[in-house]
Amino acid sequence: MQKRQLGNTDMLITPIGFGSWAIGGGDWAYAWGPQDDGDAIDAIGKAVELGMNWIDTAAVYGLGHSEELVGRAVSGMRVRPYIFTKCSLVWDGNRQVSGSLKAGSVRRECEASLKRLGVDSIDLYQVHWPNPEEDIEEGWEEMARLQEEGLVRHIGVSNFNVSQLKRAISIAPVASLQPPYSMLRPAIEKEILPFCLERNIGVIVYSPMLSGMLSGSMTRERAAAFPPDDWRRNNKEFQEPRLSRNLELAGLLQRIGKPHGCSAGEVAIAWTLRHPAVTGAIVGGRSAGQVAGVAGAAELRLRSEELDEIKTFIDGMPA
């Protein structure tokens, strides 16, 4: 896979990286249902085998379990991929998640992540959410201190708007932003992506397939059968009246992908990568097979007439 420089860092990353939200397992607020640990580790191995050179995780995914699995998966690798993780979402003894950007909390989270991942330094450490917003400056100052001490190599943010980015930049440079971006969630094109492009802030987008909706493997029956602890069970995109229209869009992407030998999901991912401000896309996978089914997105270049066809369909969708 060809590589792209991530913002102002020295890291050259592949257009797609492995996302480890879903492999964290069940029994927490934003779980994707049960997950086999062996399948998860195989998925990470397949991603690296196919050329992906970065893994994105977070402390809160599976309440620490995702980071543990990433640590296990990379421990025996001769060439270790870059590891990106996040802080600011913490949990208590009852597994209840809340936000914290207090300096002491950020430092404790970093130390715990280093231990779970089994590394001496985190390649990219990100503020997961800008909450509580009044503590952005305190949290970002501590992120900068962690970088100065070498516990993390680069620091970035996730889910920040332009105003919040400016507040962070006034304290220390922001290496990257991680926002949601897909055909069905294009809002960042208006202000956030142009700002990042102008300021040389790397952008790694998440949910390019809208949490599996545009993967090509989603069906009405599958959406109806989500397990009780799959957070998508209560997401409006997986319910009528949006579900039918979204599945129609997935069908269009399937037809566009077929001549390229690509899946609907690969078309959806490639669509996000077409934007000049986007450095890379986070692609989740719960098994080696799922990972193999999206790897082609890195090399797929959609033609102008295909992009126009997608735009026409989306413009005709209800708001």
Image: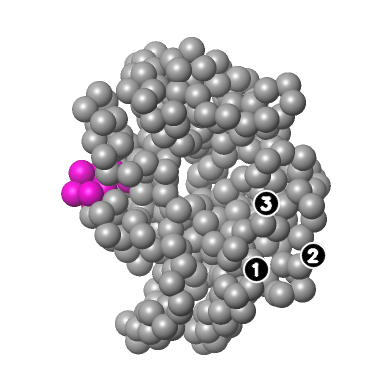
Residue, x 33% and y 44% (percent of image)?
161
Q: Compare marks 2 and 3 and give the one earlier in the sequence.
A: 2
Q: Give the range drawn in magenta.
A: 195-202
Residue, x 35% and y 67% (percent of image)?
274
Residue 270 at what x, y percent from top left? 44, 68
Q: Name the residue under label 3.
A: 231
Residues at marks 1 and 3 touching, judged by CB atoms closer than 8 Å: no
Q: In which quarter of the image is residue 74?
A: top right
* Front one among 77 and 90: 90
Residue 164 at what x, y percent from top left? 30, 36
Report, in whole angstroms, how far the alpha carbon at label 1 lies from the one at label 2: 12 Å
Report, in whole angstroms, how far the alpha carbon at label 1 lies from the one at label 3: 13 Å
Residue, x 36% and y 49% (percent of image)?
203
Q: Can residue 199 be found in the magenta stretch?
A: yes
Q: Mark 2 points at which residue?
A: 225
Which residue sits furthest left?
Answer: 198
Q: Say if residue 230 shows up in the picture.
A: yes
Q: Name the residue under label 1.
A: 239
Q: In this view, does 57 lie above or below 18?
A: above
Mark 1 neighbour density, 10 Å: few (under 14) some (14–19) many (20 or more): some
- Amino acid bearing label 2: Ala
Q: Residue 187 carries which label?
A: none
Mark 3 neighbour density, 10 Å: few (under 14) some (14–19) many (20 or more): some
* Front one among 64 and 149: 64
